[in-house]
């Protein structure tokens, strides 16, 4: 993989080319590898779409330099867009439901973005509507809309997936990733399915989330503590293509909490809940391949660790399960 060995002219040049690291708790016969996305300058996978989407939208004339980006976001996308917006000459406004990480909102403001909070009980659907209202009130404003913009998927098709492919010399048997917007998984799934149609693709969501409804399952909607992935309304997740997915795994919060602690204590990974959910699902897929229960073209599994646990310390991610705030 490429590493940065020469001086760079902008923080945007540091986005991507993150390390791919073996998850030591995975089977020796079918190792799991995770992309460590906290190595991006905004410390999450969303830096990739922040840079990619805004560069393409400026090129297409969707917004002009000096214009405004307005986005509904749980936080990391706001940070990724804010990092890119300022460097590309754009203003940024983010609509964030109140319950999401205070650290993320503070970082968005530090990056010179405006944060507009909406009531938690109104959900992300309300935040999406509010973002559109704000954009309509401004001159030269655009809503990138990560939940429906194909550039979200394209960013991972063009950057994340090729990096994994290069690091593993094309020997990728399965792709496992949590779905919030679905952009990361869909971009990687399309890339690897084009290279081998039998690549096994698994979506990950918290127990209580509704993604399994895409596969016709009945789901009992419940609140969950795992942050950044999952949905309670699949109608807002326009990027998810069930035809590209072999399975959707729902991981309970308690297992996620235990895996966050294990990853830190045993493997030195200070990662958050979505990473832990991905690790659990990826290891299960790896064992399925090893045991002959899952057919895959290669004996390896690739997943993503989207961000760092430092962003959630105020929510008690390393305290007891009961103290962990959702």
Image (tube, rainbow, N blue to C red):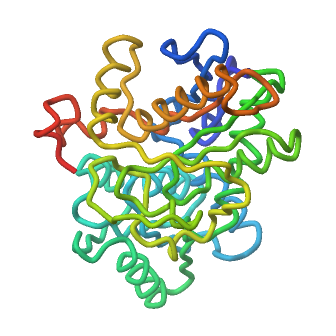
**Where does the image place residue 166, in percent across and percent down from the top left?**
80, 26
Q: How many marks?
A: 0
In the image, taking residue 230 as reference, residue 87 lies left or right, namely right
* Closer-to-camera residue (41/162): 162
Q: For residue 168, which quarter of the picture?
A: top right
Residue at the location (50% across, 46% down)?
249
* Extreme residue toward the right, this view: 195
Mark yes or no: residue 95 visible.
yes
Answer above or below: position of 146 versus 299: below
Answer above or below: position of 83 versus 300: below
Residue at the location (56% across, 77% down)?
142
Residue at the location (76% across, 32% down)?
296
In the image, taking residue 276 as reference, residue 320 lies left or right, namely left
> Quadrant location of the N terminus?
top right
Residue at the location (67% across, 52% down)?
245
Q: For residue 231, which quarter of the picture?
A: bottom left
Answer above or below: position of 262 versus 200: above
* Closer-to-camera residue (23/291): 291
Answer above or below: position of 10 versus 183: above
In the image, taking residue 101 as reference, residue 267 lies left or right, namely right
Mark yes or no: residue 19 visible.
no
Q: For residue 128, which quarter of the picture?
A: bottom left
**Where does the image place residue 48, in percent across and percent down from the top left?**
61, 47
**Where does the image place residue 309, in percent across and percent down from the top left?**
32, 33
**Where does the image place residue 173, in percent across and percent down from the top left?**
75, 30
């Amino acid at each position: 993989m490429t590493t940065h060995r020469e001086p760079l002219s902008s923080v945007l040049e540091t986005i991507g080319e993150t390390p791919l690291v073996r998850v030591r708790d995975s089977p020796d016969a079918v190792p799991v590898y995770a992309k460590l996305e906290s190595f991006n300058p905004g410390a999450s996978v969303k830096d990739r779409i922040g840079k990619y989407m805004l560069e393409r939208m400026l090129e297409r004339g969707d917004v002009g330099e000096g214009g405004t980006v307005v986005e509904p976001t749980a936080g990391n996308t706001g940070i990724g867009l804010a990092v890119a917006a300022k460097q590309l000459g754009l203003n940024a406004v983010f609509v964030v439901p109140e319950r999401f990480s205070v650290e993320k909102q503070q970082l968005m403001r530090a990056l010179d973005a405006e944060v507009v909070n909406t009531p938690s009980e109104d959900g992300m659907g309300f935040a999406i509507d509010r973002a559109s209202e704000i954009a309509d009130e401004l001159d030269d404003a655009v809503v990138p809309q990560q939940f429906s913009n194909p550039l979200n998927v394209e960013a991972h098709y063009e950057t994340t997936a090729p990096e994994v492919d290069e690091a593993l010399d094309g020997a990728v048997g399965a792709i496992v990733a949590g779905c919030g917007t679905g952009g990361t998984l869909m971009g990687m799934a399309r890339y690897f399915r084009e290279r081998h149609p039998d690549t096994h693709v698994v979506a990950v969501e918290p127990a209580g989330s509704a993604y399994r409804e895409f596969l016709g399952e009945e789901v009992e909607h419940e609140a969950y503590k795992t942050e950044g992935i999952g949905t309670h309304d699949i109608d807002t997740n326009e990027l998810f293509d069930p035809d590209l997915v072999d399975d959707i795994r729902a991981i309970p919060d308690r297992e996620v909490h235990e895996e966050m602690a294990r990853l830190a204590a045993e493997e030195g990974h200070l990662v958050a809940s979505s990473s832990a959910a991905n690790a659990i699902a990826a290891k299960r897929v790896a064992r399925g391949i090893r045991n002959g229960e899952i057919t895959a073209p290669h004996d390896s599994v690739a997943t993503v660790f989207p961000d760092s646990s430092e962003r959630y310390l105020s929510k008690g991610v390393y305290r007891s399960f009961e103290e962990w705030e959702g």
